[in-house]
Amino acid sequence: MGMTVVFRTILLVLLIICAIAVNLTRNLLQAVIIFMSYSSIMCILWILMESPDLAITEAAVGAGVSGILFLMTLKKIRAEDAGETPEPRNGQEEKDL
Amino acid sequence: MKEWIRKWLNGDLDLLENVTDAAEVPDSTREELKEQKKEFRQRLYEKTNTDAAIQAERKSFYAIYRGIAVISCVVLIGVLLFTVANMPRYGVENPRTVEVVKRYVEKGLQETGAVNIVAGMILDYRAFDTLGESHVLFTALVCVMILLRLDKKTIRGGHLDDYYLVKQDTYFDVSKDSIIRLVGTVLVPCIILFGFYVLLNGQNGPGGGFSGGAIMGAALIMFSTAFGFDTVDRVFTRKMLMITSFVSLAFYSFAKGYVFFTGANGLENHIPKGTPGAILSGGLILPLDIAVGLVVACTMFGFYSLFKRGSIGGD
């Protein structure tokens, strides 16, 4: 009982840290990775709350497929390393190619 | 006429063929277009950074934007915390909400034949909710297809960005990587098998249509990453995806509509429930699970394929 409460408290604290960090980070790639770890923590929490159905779906959709879709979008708009400089990158993408 | 409709559905028909675009510059080559674009961007950048009026406007806009963002965030947090504070405590019986739950828990196995009460709820008592969710997924796929699909006209028509994106994607193709290939060879069969297990076992244990379909879709994504889209295109074409989704959704609608209709009219329900715990049990739950799973798997892989290269099945 005691161990479960400690484990759950640690997970909840990590969840809140992830939720705040995903808003504060400037790098979009890091934001996607933090979002995926948020989903993984949430998946363990669903198991602790005795709803394995939701845990499976959270792991497959939240941590898997939606993360992949975000990464694909970042690649499409060429913004994997954008966000650190708020100014528009004038003409830089032509140089990248 | 039929030919015309088929061409229109395939995206080959250009309805604006004879309409000339005034802004179009047909004589410039790609390099010239690139130069023009760069120059324009440079000019815009300089203007926005030097013009005092634009600077002041930008400054005030950001001040208002920040203020509104902070206020709406605080209000939203307050409303959510207030709602959470008024919710019944976790695990405590609440007379307002407990009646329906009690019925589900006590009579669920007897009425639906499913050991997993959650599956009995979402695919028997609340089956129309799940039907709506499947249709939402299908509609989302159709919308993504309308927005992101690259037909021949777009690639040929000299849209600079699309041209470079296609070029870039072929350059960074990871399917030649031997590590990814080996990992794919080992993992993909296991993931697909686990997906089938979750899908077929929905009425007996945790899982069901949505989670099983999502796992199978993830396995398809991994397969296409490891072995390239050409391998997947041999079986997974756009036509097959559309037919699968349509047949699954139509089957779901007709089967569940039939059950609701006969049930509402007091007729006898003659779909066998089976032994609780067996694979073939739970009446209609297993076929409905399979239908939902197929729709979800098709949608997940369709999203990935459209995001990655702008087409499903390479057409």
Image: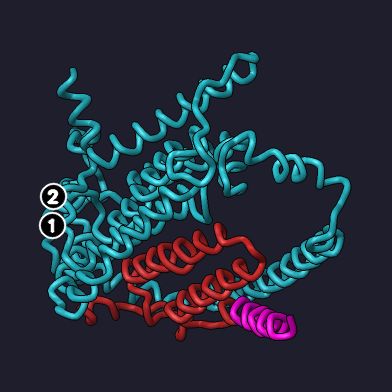
Chain colours: A red, B cyan
Q: Is residue B205 positioned above or below B108 on the image?
A: below
Q: Quadrant of residue B100?
A: top right
- The CA distance from mark 1 to mark 2 is 7 Å
Q: Secondary structure at mark 1?
A: helix
Q: Nearer the viewer, residue B174 or B122?
A: B122
Q: How many marks?
A: 2
- Kindly identify which residue carries mark 1: B230
Residue A10 is inside the magenta segment: yes
Q: Position of residue B159 (x, y in %)?
A: 22, 57
Q: Given the image, what chain letter belongs to the residue carrying mark 2? A: B
Residue B88 is inside the magenta segment: no
State whether discs 1 and 2 lie on one chain: yes
Q: Secondary structure at mark 2?
A: loop
* Marker disc for residue B234: 2
Q: Which residues are magenta?
A: A1-20
Q: Quadrant of residue B224?
A: bottom left
Residue B32 appearing in the image: no
| Quarter that holds the N terminus of chain B | top left
Q: Nearer the viewer, residue B160 or B183?
A: B183
Q: Position of residue B167 (x, y in %)?
A: 16, 67
Q: Amino acid at mark 1?
A: Asp
Q: Amino acid at mark 2?
A: Arg
* Residue at 29% across, 61% down: B221
* Marker disc for residue B139: none
* Residue at 65% across, 15% down: B266
Crowd class of label 2 (few under 14; some 14 to 19; many from 20; radius 10 Å): few
